[in-house]
Image (cartoon, rainbow, N blue to C red):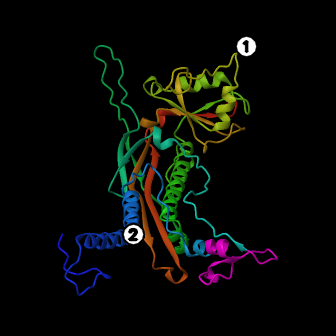
Amino acid sequence: MFIDTIPAGLETKSDDIGVDEVKAAVAAVAADVKAATDPLKARIDELEAKANRPNLGAETKAEPTAEQKAFGLYLRHGKNHPDIDHKTLRVSDDTRGGYMAPAEFSSEFLKELVEYSPIRAISSVRQTGNPSVIYPARIGRANAKWKGENQPQEGSEPSFGEVEIATKELNTFVDISNQLLADSGGAAEREVRESLAEDFALKEGTAFVNGTGGPQPDGFMQDARVPQIPNGHATNLSADALISILYALPAAYRRNATWVMNGATIATIRKLKDSQGNYLWQPGLQAGLPETILGRPVADAADMPEATSGEFPIAVGDFEAGYRIVDRLDMSVFVNPYLLATNSVTRFHATRRTGGAVIRPFALRKLKMATSA
């Protein structure tokens, strides 16, 4: 080993320096260097090991906020520590003047469950780029007759018309504070969009059942062309009435029919019994098969009327053939951070255009709570 400087303590004017003395001096210097660098090397190794350690699904902790840092110092050192920013600590109502722990913002939103209407799922849905869609329709039939020899032919004039489904606009806006948007880490904006989608789906479902036209879609329950079948009693549902209304449908539509009623009506029907006390409604026994009434599936629609006198609590039919939904646009959300910027508020505008109408009234039936239609 070549040494170009003489270690401290070995300066001498003599040329007779022993080899052992040189080795001892070099060893002493190396020991000093090792003692000084070992802690640094250990720290570097620790950091590398931590960086290379696999993340087994653990959540990455966010950097503590100023409030959390101040509160941590307060707990460890008391309120007089020089590094505590007292402005970030919230004084409690305690008479001893304590400090409250800073709030933690959760990404979990508390919300009510929305009960959607199933009409979109059982009806036919079409997309369009126009304000409305016109469907030609045959309203009447030809009138052929049997004739004897030499009897003259008679003409018939089946009537034709059209069904127009106009797309109607559903819109609203929501204001939310910029502080909430920032603190939630994107969760608040996501919840705003989900809330708008839930509200639109709820309003659409209600209109598809009970819409009165005008600015709303035309609901099938408000269409006077859909034939009515009397229940035979003003307040009590009967199994005979269910049989009557199902078989009032033409066979072609009966095979693809779906019952539509609300939860209270479903509960009433499930309680119907025969003369031996057996329930008439038999639930599906095979996994994946829906429960049925007289072999046809049931759609639970919260917007259907109750089974009270004069109401129509049950509809049945081939809704895919009988009711048409036309979508002009999917729900669009426009974010406007400028309109209320001086109030630190962002506005979300939501719009959707959709329409609905009965296109084949003879594919549907309504049950009326009355003794006659």
Q: Nearer the viewer, mark 2 or mark 1?
A: 2
Looking at the image, is 348 positioned above or below residue 330? below
Q: Is residue 62 left or right of residue 92?
A: left
Q: Amino acid at mark 1?
A: Ser
Q: Secondary structure at mark 1?
A: loop
| Res 30 quadrant in image | bottom left
Point out the stretch of residues depicted in magenta.
71-98
**Residue extending farthest right:** 95
- Which is nearer the eye, 237 or 92? 92
Residue annotated with mark 1: 275
Percent coordinates x, y for residue 333 in the rendering:
43, 64
Q: Which residue is mark 2?
A: 35
Q: Nearer the viewer, residue 261 or 278?
A: 278
Asked if the residues shown at circle 2 and circle 1 are in contact, with their CB atoms under 8 angstroms apart, the answer is: no
Can you give x and y, in whole percent of width and height, for residue 78 in the image?
69, 77
Q: Is residue 242 above or below residue 70?
A: above
The answer to whether residue 215 is seen in the rendering is no
Q: Is-magenta flag for residue 156?
A: no
- Can you give x and y, in whole percent of width and height, for residue 42 in the image? 40, 63
Q: Is residue 362 above or below residue 67?
A: above
Residue kind at label 2, given as amino acid type: Ala
Q: Position of residue 15 (x, y in %)?
A: 19, 82
Image quadrant of residue 156?
top left
Q: Residue furthest top?
A: 276
Q: Count the marks: how many? A: 2
